[in-house]
Amino acid sequence: MDAAGVSRVSLHGGVARVTVGPSADDSVHVVVSLRSTDQERLREKCIPGARLERNITDGSLALRLSQSGREKCGETWNVSVPARLFVALEFTNADVDLSGIRGGVIASVSGTGNVTASVDSAPASVTMGVGDVRVVATRTAVGELVLKSEVGRAELTLHGVRVPAVKRGSSSQIETRGTGHHDIRLRTRVGNVSLIVN
């Protein structure tokens, strides 16, 4: 899909493996597949009832995978976008691997999973239910940095220096501020959060 006039891409799904990276051109490339250990269910229920919905509004491209019925299959998303775009992800349970995005990232996984992201001079916000969040920010003029785990560890390495966390019971939190304008907020209810700023 041509990304001319698009400044934001949002992906919405259920139980998924999601990979997002930069495209070589000014286009959005999306491959979504369904998976199940029950091949009959996949063939007879999931695939016939699945639909990838696309909506463009005010420079925002929204992609949503809809599956009809109660029985849903797992999803695999392989997406490449122009690095300049802002990327928003919203999934129920997901393992997310995101890299090379300069426009900014918001990721929300309400259930379980993991998010691993590498952003280049961009803001980032990740909210996780249960699972780990690992972000590497390169060439980022950081503003507000907030890392919080309600049950787990928060770890921040800022230009090679380890920043200590404030621990209260099972929670761990780090809040600090730089002089830049790229805010990074990483949160998980249960799991570990890690941020490396280079």
Image: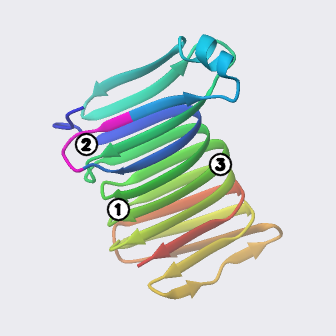
Residue 190 in the figure: left or right of residue 68: right
153 or 37: nearer the viewer: 37
Task: Identify residue type, mark 2.
Answer: Ser
Looking at the image, which residue is at 69% across and 77% down?
166
**Quarter of the view holding residue 137:** bottom left
Identify the main secondary structure in magenta.
loop
The answer to which of marks 2 and 3 sits earlier in the sequence is 2
**Quarter of the view holding residue 14:** top right
> How far is the residue under mark 1 from the one under mark 3?
23 Å
Q: Residue 8 lies in magenta, yes or no? A: no
In the figure, 88 relative to 135: above or below? Answer: above
Q: Which mark is residue 113?
A: 3
Q: Nearer the viewer, mark 1 or mark 3?
A: 3
Asked if the residue at tag 1 contacts the one at tag 2, i.e. Cβ–Cβ closer than 8 Å, the answer is: no
Looking at the image, which residue is at 52% across and 37% down?
76
Secondary element under disc 2, as helix, strand or loop, is loop
Instruction: Farthest residue to the right: give it.
Output: 169
Residue 35 in the figure: left or right of residue 85: right
**Quarter of the view holding residue 2:** top left
Asked if the residue at tag 3 contacts the one at tag 1, i.e. Cβ–Cβ closer than 8 Å, the answer is: no
Image spot of residue 88 (x, y percent): 43, 43
Looking at the image, which residue is at 32% across and 32% down?
61
Image spot of residue 87 (x, y percent): 38, 46
The answer to which of marks 1 and 3 sits earlier in the sequence is 3
Looking at the image, which residue is at 41% across and 52% down?
105
Q: Which residues are magenta?
A: 24-30
**Which class describes the residues within 10 Å of circle 2: few (<14), some (14-19), or many (20+)?**
some
Q: Which mark is residue 122?
A: 1
Q: Quadrant location of the C terminus?
A: bottom left
Task: Identify residue type, mark 1.
Answer: Ala
In the figure, 29 relative to 185: above or below? Answer: above
